[in-house]
Image: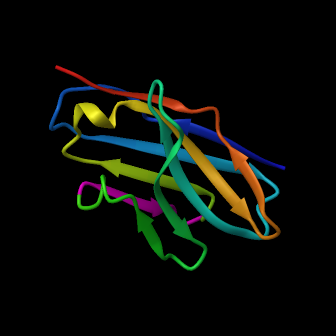
Amino acid sequence: QVQLQESGGGLVQPGGSLRLSCAASGSMFSINRMGWYRQAPGKERELVATISSGGSTNYADSVKGRFTISRGNAKNTVYLQMNSLKPEDTAVYYCNVLKLGGFIYWGQGTQVTVSS
């Protein structure tokens, strides 16, 4: 089992920045990838960004150039730096871990609201 705890969400004005953090604990072996997904009201959950165990990153087209995913030195923390935020970035953001064998774990989510 892997437990995930997100933090860093909140209310920000358009053009502002937020940094999300996700701390993972528990069975940390065989982690293939960590990432962030988001779900806006009335919409399906969508991929935001992922980072592999080797450090390769992948971003949704809608956030490229504005968001940056990274991992802490201990490799059990993943961050999402969000710059130039737009109202359409408003969503609940979920941390995600994919382990070898296809096991997937989710955090409880953190709300990000972009509004003036």
Location of residue 58 (image quadrant): bottom left
**Image quadrant containing the C terminus:** top left
Q: Position of residue 18 (x, y in %)?
A: 31, 39
Q: Write down the quadrant of residue 14 in the picture.
A: top left
- Whether 73 is among the magenta residues is yes
Tell me where the magenta segment starts and ends, as one range: 66-74
Residue 114 screen position, x and y as percent: 27, 28
| Of 40 and 22, the residue lying toward us | 40
Left or right of 95, for residue 40: left
- Locate residue 61 relative to residue 94 in the image: left or right: left
Residue at 22% from the left image edge and 22% from the top image edge: 115
The x and y percentages for residue 39 are 49, 35
Question: In the rendered view, how is the structure colored?
Answer: rainbow
**Can residue 84 be found in the magenta stretch?**
no
90 with respect to 5 (left or right): left
Q: From the viewer's perspective, is 11 left or right of 107?
A: left
